[in-house]
Amino acid sequence: MYGQKENISLPSGLANQLKHLYGPDARIVAQAPVGGGDINEAYHLVLQDGRDLFLKVHANVAADFFTAEASGLAALRQTGLPVPEVLSCGRNYLLLSYVKSARKSHDYWQQLGYELAKLHHSDPTAFTCGHRFGFTQDNYAGSTRQHNRPSDSWIDFFRTQRLQPFLKLCWSYFSSDEKHLAEQLLAHLEDRLIEPDFPSLLHGDLWCGNVMTGPAGEPIFIDPSVSVGFREVDIAKTELFGGFTGEFYDAYQEACPLDPGYPERRDLYNLYPLLNHLHLFGNAYHLAVTRILRRYA
């Protein structure tokens, strides 16, 4: 059920942005909350001309929180990846095109695999300030700041911009033995990972909740945590919580075959999101983290 427009407290500047985008008569005539997110409030808005919009709101986030997401969506869209269009971005809100979902097409999962492979094969040089890996700005993994200082070494980038900051955030959860394991892992990361043949623009948070179905039954990618890195990171994340079919992996492998040894590296890449979950959600993720530390240290 849609409420009246008085039921929503508009972020500062949004009303003027709507008029700038859609004319002086633009106004919200109906809205409904959209569930599914852990961080922001979200609304489906309807304007007086029947136009549908999607609004994400958070009153207490860092000043660059929504601009960072907008930059990531713009980077993905530049490669041709199907993502919502960024319409307006403010200090406490992000306004996007609204995706009207339909039933998945018969080849939905194959499309998803091919689209991801196309993203990973796209040229990422515009996003790394002259280096191979990183991104033009820091952004966020959920609500946690994600560091993206550019580097020419993938292993060094993964060590200094991914594992080290998140291990530090979680340090109080670890015993002295577990801290030693973490230090050993960081010191010997070159023995566990490989440098990719080519850098790839990554979605960065590719679990099944961050892919939705568009109006023609096609896959639409949402809520990225973008950087340029090794494409195995995206594939590993799809396997962390499941939900992706064999057709997806077959299509991806056909278009962009994975390097030998990927299964041995997968859990090490998933240490990063699990550390973030330990930081954000607490001790329930401690065992999963320490299992990986013991395996790879």
Image (tube, helix red, strand yellow):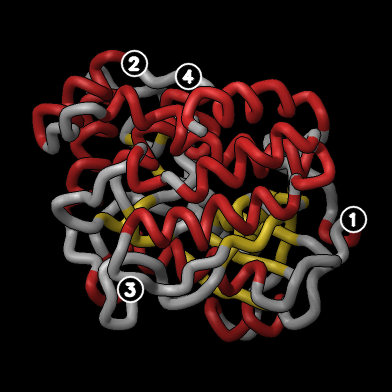
Pick the residue in front: 240 or 152: 152
**Is residue 273 left or right of 107 when viewed as pictured?**
right
Percent of width and height locating residue 114: 19, 36
Q: Give how far across and how far down residue 124 sits, in percent.
A: 24, 66
- Mark 2 highlights which residue? 245
Q: Nearer the observer, disc 3 or disc 1?
A: 3
The picture quadrant where one finds residue 77 is bottom left
Along the horizontal axis of the image, is 73 left or right of 25? left
From the top left corner, tell me how far across and down residue 38 is, in percent.
74, 41
User: Are circles 3 and 4 on residues that touch, CB within 8 Å?
Assistant: no
Secondary element at image label 4: loop
Q: Which mark is residue 209?
A: none
Q: To which residue does mark 1 refer?
A: 7
Q: CA distance from mark 3 to mark 1?
A: 40 Å
Q: Check disc 2 and give the amino acid type.
A: Thr
Q: CA distance from mark 1 to mark 2?
A: 40 Å
Kind of residue indicated by mark 4: Gly
Dot 1 or dot 4: first in sequence order is 1
Dot 3 or dot 1, earlier in sequence: 1
- Measuring from the top left, give residue 102's x and y in whole percent: 43, 29
CA–CA distance in space, label 3 to label 4: 29 Å
Type of residue at label 3? Phe
1 vs 4, front mark: 4
Q: Are marks 3 and 1 in contact (CB under 8 Å)?
A: no
Number of residues whose C-alpha sits closer than 10 Å to that of mark 2, classed few (under 14), some (14–19) or many (20 or more): few
Residue 127 is marked as 3
Q: Which residue is painted at 66% across and 40% down in the image?
A: 180
Circle 4 is placed at which residue position? 242
Find the distance from the CA under tag 2 to the CA under tag 4. Answer: 8 Å
